[in-house]
Image: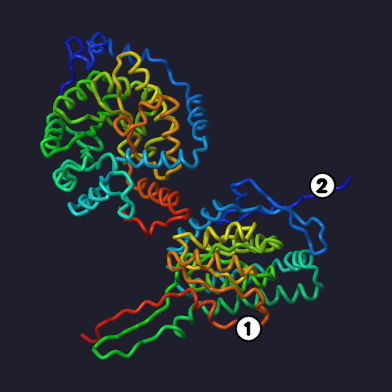
Amino acid sequence: MTPTPSSTASSPSATGVFDDVVRSESSLRRFLHGLPGVDQVGCEARAAGLATRSIKTTSKAYAIDLAIRMVDLTTLEGQDTHGKVRALASKAMRPDPADPTCPATAAVCVYPDMVATAKQTLGESGVHVAAVATAFPSGRAAMDIKLADTRDAVEAGADEIDMVIDRGAFLSGRYLDVYEEIAQVKEACGDAHLKVIFETGELQTYDNVRRASWLAMMAGGHFIKTSTGKVQPAATLPVTLIMLEAVRDFREQTGQMVGVKPAGGIKTTKDAIKYLVMVNEICGDDWLDPDWFRFGASTLLNDLLMQRTKMTTGRYSGPDYFTLD
Amino acid sequence: MSRIDVRKTYKLYIGGAFPRSESGRSYVVNDAKGRLLANAAQASRKDARDAVVAARAAFGGWSGRTAYNRAQVVYRIAEVLEGRREQFEAEIRAAEGVTPARARASVDAAIDRLVWYAGWADKITQVVGNANPVAGPFFNLSTPEPSGVIAVVAPRGSLLGLVSVVAPLIVTGNTVVVIAREDNPLTAITLGEVMATSDLPGGVVNVLTGSQAEIAPWLASHMDVNGIDLTGVEDDELATELEVAAADNLKRVRRPAPDTDWLVEPGLDRMTQFLETKTVWHPIGV
């Protein structure tokens, strides 16, 4: 993509509220660098404090079912086959075949070439198909390739597109390039929802996470997502806290809600419940809904199912009783 | 100036580490004369759960080792125990109120038992495995494989009893979660220290101290536990309850035998009880 000269007008911001901000490179930088800095110690302490809440009995049962409904069941491996994607899609529709009261997950998340397979299996079940596009996970490709990647996935039937931002451009301060990229991918998405992946493990500072959040929301992302899952550290509580604060503040300013999706490294029910507590405390229960909060995960689902089984049967369950993928 | 006493904190032994109980509880352990000996951690069901997770994680590596190497490790436990025999003798005398000679005999027997079982590691397959005659051009071989994670309720006899139930399980490749005697748990934790320094991978043996009646039902019903050894259960009602709970995932169950004389040479049944038989067919020739 050719850098947009700062003098030319860029795409209008999604809500219209920020048209002045995104008018030029310098106004955008002024806005992003004018955001209040993140108090690192305070943020980490707050996240750790919220993580100590004890959630038991009926609240825990509710949290587990909610978390299952929020899972984007993910397989993003070079070794993925159509068979594996079909198996995963079946699992997404009926995570615990032994228990019909177990809810379905929100979506399955696959590479674009697997979208058709996933869609075929899922049919009208209501489970969405999310596709990672734009040269996932590195995002290092020409703009027209990224757009073609996106259109392919949408044409194949993807309901949601997970794009990665150009971290190189972001870190070198070319914010308007990133903004334009998101806006163009959003246009290519058509009716599909757009999730914007920051890869927070590569953004270096919490301030950058806050800036990226605002940038993506102004460009029209429906969801902001922490990571690809390919880089460590992936999702962490403090990073998610900052993103939750950003969507909360964004709604205050514009009236628009944006979703948040932590992805990568969330493996246990305990972890998932910590995130849900944080969502409730930072954003309120409007966000406690699969439309506004998701978990990008593969192993998390089995642990949720084991905990769910423990709650219904009263005995500890084991990994032998659930599918591996 | 007198020295300040350095008292030992007896904790649990889970996954190769010595954590306190997740519940934060402890209970008083008295010596044979009813005087305070120490405080022991009182394990909860969640400690039992964590112990099963640790045992399961350790199972692949431990059962995958060669029998020869498992023998070396169990023999090593005997070596390290030998080096710390005074400590064990003193603990047994304090806890059980026995004479020095009896305590020494008990430690001797425990060490000998470990050596005896260590020797079985690479011999049990020859004894209970078989080359089966079949009507076709095939080798048909049956070999014993460890069952998996075994929960053990330890019997009386703080050292010898414990060694006699744990050694036969680990030598064949199982990993264990053992509930130590509630009234006499300290030697079990000290034995954990011996195991932690004997090249035994963390998680192969996990020791919980606390109430048998509280912890055992959770292990008996746990779907990720493959067998349960009820040797040390003295309450008939509890034993029945545990056997019923264990039926859910068809655990192998060893019935209670609290009055076993541990000084008698054991047979093979403590090893064979928690083995599965794998049979393979292999074409002959070409």
Residue A127: quarter of image: top left
Q: Are marks 2 and 1 on the same chain?
A: yes
Q: Mark 2 = which residue?
A: B4
Q: Amino acid at mark 1?
A: Glu
Mark seen at residue B265: 1
| Residue sitting at x 17%, y 37% | A158
Taking the spot 51% from the left edge, 71% from the top edge, the residue there is B253
Residue type marked 2: Ile
Q: Chain of mark 2?
A: B
Looking at the rendered structure, the number of numbered marks drawn on it comes to 2
Please indicate whether residue A302 sits to the left or right of residue B182 in the image: left
B102 horizontally vs A134: left or right: right
Label for residue A170?
Answer: none
Of all residues shown, which one is farthest toward the front? B237
Left or right of B92 on screen, residue A22: left
- Residue visible at 49% across and 38% down in the picture: A55
Marked residue chain, label 1: B
**Which of the two residues, B119 or B51, is positioned nearer the viewer here?**
B51
Residue B80 or residue B53, whichever sits in front: B53
Residue A142, image quadrant? top left
